[in-house]
Amino acid sequence: MLRYGVAACQVDQPNPADRAQIGRNTSRMLEMVDMAVAGYGPFMDLRLLVFPEFGHAAPIYPTAKALLAKLTVPIPNEHTERYLAKARELGVYIQTATFLEEDPRWPGKVFNTTCLIGPEGLWYRYRKVNPWLPWEVHTSPHDLDGYDEEFFPVAHTPIGNLGAAICYDWLFPESLRQLSANGAEVLLRVSAYMDPWGATPPMDWWTVVNRCRALENTAYVVAANQGASLAHYAPFSWPGGSMVVDFEGRILAQADPGPGEKIVVGVIDVGALRQERSRRVGHHALGHLRTEAYPVYRERFYAPGQRTADTDHTVELNERSVAAAKERLNGSRGR
């Protein structure tokens, strides 16, 4: 079970305007699971499938109140139950596309959430810690006073230790380092990375970051990116380029950049990764980490606990929070 096939599945679907339309997108992603498992069956035992950010619904409304009125869902829900049935039918693990999640524990807040679902059930839900500011009006767990769940959960499954982070999270090396410190061996990227920062020169942040996070954590990366056309998800176009990367930073497989539905598969060997982590003395970044050498982590810039129940989460609020963080940063530098 430790050497198996993985699939990064990118989608190109109309973005739902309300909850009633989410089921259409779920149905298509379940069809992609069937196609991937059956189509690649002669070549590999496909055990893990990863889908992109905003595959169920994207934040097309500019405030949390509007999203709560139109698009949010609790977790678990009817869609996660459908994924669970499919995981049990095929014996696979599915890292879902993200949901806009509501939670009665945090009234008025919206989380951007992906779930790992396997034959055993719902392993974890990961809520995006670093929303893409200022446009995303989702709430980070970091910003809630009294939040008591693990920020970076890792599932210790029969196919290895799996952990996910969402899109902009990956520009913060700390996010993937914490997942790795929590035991993750396969890092799953659920992403909606738009042009011009996507999978093509001259910038190609997508490929650079995926490869770097793999090699600096000695971990596999399975990264699924949005392939939506501009017509389906304005005002951006989405370059796809979904990929599988090994623990040395080598690209094992990648979809040709460009919009459209695509499935890219590769084989990963968690047993080989474990042997490598155990054997290595050199190039073992986590084992070499001198945490006390970095006083920046003793500073506070984007302050925690600043989202309260009586305020709507808006782009303007994000902009004010960023301005305050920049002011703290300038102050710490003596400017």
Image: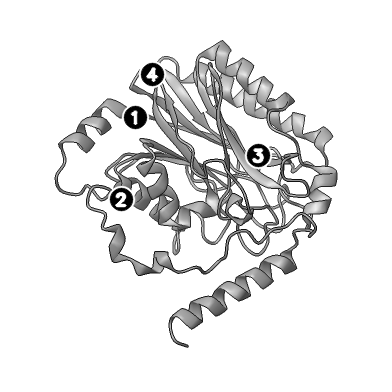
In front of the other: 329 or 194: 329
Give the labeled residue for mark 2.
Answer: 216
Separation of residues labelled 3 and 1 (CA atoms): 25 Å
Measured from the top left, where is residue 136 in percent x and y? Answer: 67, 57
What's the mark number on residue 55? 3
- Which residue type does callout 1 highlight? Ile
Separation of residues labelled 2 and 1 (CA atoms): 17 Å
Separation of residues labelled 2 and 4 (CA atoms): 30 Å
Lower position in the chain sequence, tag 2 or tag 1 = 2
Q: Is residue 244 above or below residue 122?
A: below
Asked whether, in this view, residue 24 is left or right of residue 280, the answer is right
Measured from the top left, where is residue 199 in percent x and y? Answer: 48, 53
Q: Write the residue at 83% across / 52% down.
A: 66
Q: Write the residue at 68% across / 21% down.
A: 81
Q: Which element carries disc 2, helix, strand or loop?
A: helix
Quadrant of the frame with the N terminus: top left
Q: Is residue 254 visible?
A: no
Which is more foreground, mark 1 or mark 4? Answer: 1
- Which residue type does callout 2 highlight? Glu
Q: Which element carries disc 3, helix, strand or loop?
A: loop
Lower position in the chain sequence, tag 1 or tag 4 = 4
The quadrant in which residue 195 appears is bottom right
What's the mark number on residue 268? 1
Measured from the top left, where is residue 299 in percent x and y? Answer: 45, 69
Q: Which element carries disc 4, helix, strand or loop?
A: loop
Q: Is residue 195 above or below residue 242?
A: below
Lower position in the chain sequence, tag 4 or tag 3 = 4
